[in-house]
Image: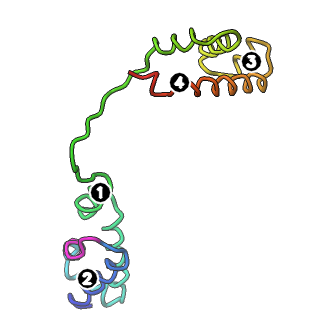
């Protein structure tokens, strides 16, 4: 296989796998092949294994995380995007005051249910064991309570 045939073969493989920077890809693969030595390539060509070896090198160049092509072209494209502006992120923290306001606004069983649920850290199973109330009943009570809370409160209300 001549150099032009190897280039054409690499180009076809790159087109098949939709390589973005095809010329750079061809150069990287050819560089890897020629680092092996011309004698090695001639031996493979005599055994008619050069085409399959080129194919394997091409795939490894694309998908191996250690290859120069992957590190230069594939990895940055997958994990980094262009910044079109500045994004300001504010750290929001959960407000215990707002939770206490919610508890104080509730009355009767709803208030007791929410207080006990907080003590059990939201674990309905442990809450049902401590209160000797069936798990399904507690689930229904919590669902009804959540509907009441959602009518007048939003999740963002609990963060500062």
Decide: is 58 above or below 104: below
Decide: is 72 above or below 134: below
Mark found first going from the N terminus, 1 or 2: 2
- Of badges 1 and 2, nearer the viewer stands 1
Mark found first going from the N terminus, 4 or 2: 2
- Pick the quarter of the image with the C terminus: top left
Depth check: give the residue in front, 110 or 23: 110
Left or right: 9 in relation to 137: left
Residue 74 x/y as whole percent: 29, 61
Q: Secondary structure at mark 2?
A: helix
Q: Secondary structure at mark 4?
A: loop
Tags 1 and 4 touching, CB below 8 Å: no
The residue labelled by disc 1 is: 75
Marking on residue 153: 4
Residue 78 x/y as whole percent: 32, 56
- Magenta segment boundaries in residue numbering: 20-28
The residue labelled by disc 3 is: 128
């Amino acid at each position: 296989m001549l150099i032009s045939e190897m280039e054409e073969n690499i180009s076809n493989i790159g087109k098949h796998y939709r390589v973005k920077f095809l010329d750079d890809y061809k150069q990287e693969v050819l560089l890897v092949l020629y680092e092996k030595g011309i004698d090695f390539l001639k031996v493979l060509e005599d055994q008619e294994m050069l085409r399959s070896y080129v194919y394997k090198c091409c795939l490894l160049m694309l998908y191996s995380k250690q290859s120069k092509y992957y590190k230069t072209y594939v990895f940055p494209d997958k994990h980094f995007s262009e910044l079109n502006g500045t994004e300001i992120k504010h750290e929001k923290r959960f407000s215990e005051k707002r939770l206490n306001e919610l508890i104080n606004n509730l009355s009767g069983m709803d208030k007791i249910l929410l207080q006990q649920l907080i003590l059990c850290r939201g674990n309905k199973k442990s809450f049902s064991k401590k209160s000797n109330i069936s798990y399904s009943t507690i689930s229904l009570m919590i669902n009804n309570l959540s509907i009441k809370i959602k009518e007048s409160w939003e999740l963002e209300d609990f963060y500062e």
